Amino acid sequence: MGRGSMSQPGSPIKTRHGERDSTVLGDSDAIEKRQGRSESSSATLLEMDTIDEPRKLDYLDLEKQNGDGSRPKDKIGNTRASLTLWMTLNTVATIAIVFTNKAIFDDPSFRKSQVAFATFHLFVTALTLYILSRPFISLFVPSPMRLRPMLPLAMTMCLNVIFQNLSLTYSSITFYQIARILFTPMVALINFLFYQKSIPRNAAYTLVPMCIGVFIISYYEPKSTAHPEAEQTSLLSVFLALTSVFIGSVYTVWIASYQRKFEMNGFQLLYNQAPMGGVMLMVLIPWTDKLPVVQEAPANKWMMILISGALAALINLSLFFIISGAGAVSSTVVGHVKTCAIVALGWIISKRPVTDRSAFGVIVAIASIIV
């Protein structure tokens, strides 16, 4: 995947909607100045390179003008109260969806329906984005793209969702979440090898204990047999988790590249990906899945599936407000809280004692992301 072009601060930008005499100002507090206009407007875009601290960029509003000459604006609430609400909702929904999906996949009748479950989530996401883009809400303005450029990203998104679900299915919740900490060093490595992007030396040092902690838990989890009542992690679990991390890291880097190249925000990009990915996966269901018999599957599992879809929609919605309004510290704290909460709850539910040898790896990995 080639590197998307990024306009230099202060330089004119040409978009596929036409050339405008506007500039992109690199400082997050700068105001976009327009010649010949008494008003100024800007949309916020997060450049999703996870190796850097989250940052806000004042970005050129690339949407078409309305018929009356005015320009549509994304409705983003950035007040402290609303931002705190969205952070709380995102944290609760993220924790809830991990445990909900785990409970669904623990049922043997749903364990072999991975592609169908991912398809359901993608269509729920597509429907949510469609509703949010309608004029009566107008949270964002769709920016349709041709099919061919979106295919690689949509395919990677599908693989990312499927392998995340597989990893959660065959791993303990604690190991699943701890393995995901490797996203940061993996994205850093991919950006360094293919995009010549480096990170500060001090930040690189923190990646070392992070990797050591995940290695320790990956080594001891499959070997832990002293507590048969605890959920066990196999070598297959380790393979699926690491594969999920690699695919997810590639997907994360490509999101940033696509956003720069096609000048879209996260909602506009996902609006193009989700329905495409859903259709691609739906075609595979007859060959990959063994769907449960509706009458034989427990009724509470179907309810959990609906709840999981609602939680996925809530996560996508709240994430948009968080990346639009939160600074670096706030975004980082939200991520830490979710990781620590999921790991702690997962460890309690797994009935694994604190004296288990893999606990040391958990402590090292968690400490590396907090310090």
Image (cartoon, rainbow, N blue to C red):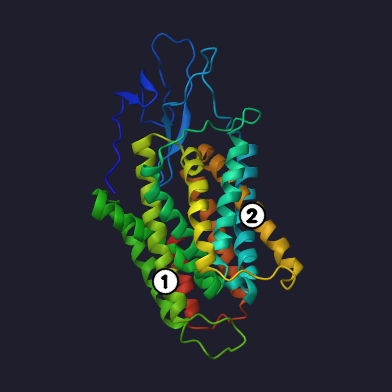
**In the image, what residue occupies the spot 51% across and 37% down?**
324
Residue 34: quadrant of the picture:
top left
Coordinates of residue 25 in the picture (x, y in percent): 36, 27
Coordinates of residue 291 in the picture (x, y in percent): 61, 69
The disc labelled 2 sits on which kind of residue?
Gly
Residue 134: quadrant of the picture:
top right
Judge by depth and name the residue closer to the eye, 45 or 343. 45
**In the image, what residue occupies the spot 54% across and 25% down?**
73
Query: How many neighbours does mark 2 have within 10 angstroms: few (below 14), some (14-19), or many (20 or more)?
Result: many
Coordinates of residue 361 in the picture (x, y in percent): 45, 75
**In the image, what residue occupies the spot 53% across and 30% down?**
141
| Residue 309 marker | 2
Residue 270 in the figure: left or right of residue 129 = left
Please state, as top left, top right, bottom left or bottom right, where the C terminus lies in the image.
bottom left
Q: Closer to the observer: label 1 or label 2?
A: 2
Coordinates of residue 66 in the picture (x, y in percent): 53, 18
Q: Mark 1 vs mark 2: which is more N-terminal? A: 1
Location of residue 233 with respect to 64 vertically, above or below: below
Q: CA distance from mark 1 to mark 2?
A: 30 Å
Location of residue 156 with respect to 255 vertically, above or below: below
Secondary structure type for disc 2? helix
Secondary structure type for disc 1? helix
Q: Can residue 217 be spotted in the picture?
A: no
**In the image, what residue occupies the spot 44% across and 71% down?**
240
| Residue 329 marker | none
Residue tagged 1: 214
The disc labelled 1 sits on which kind of residue?
Val
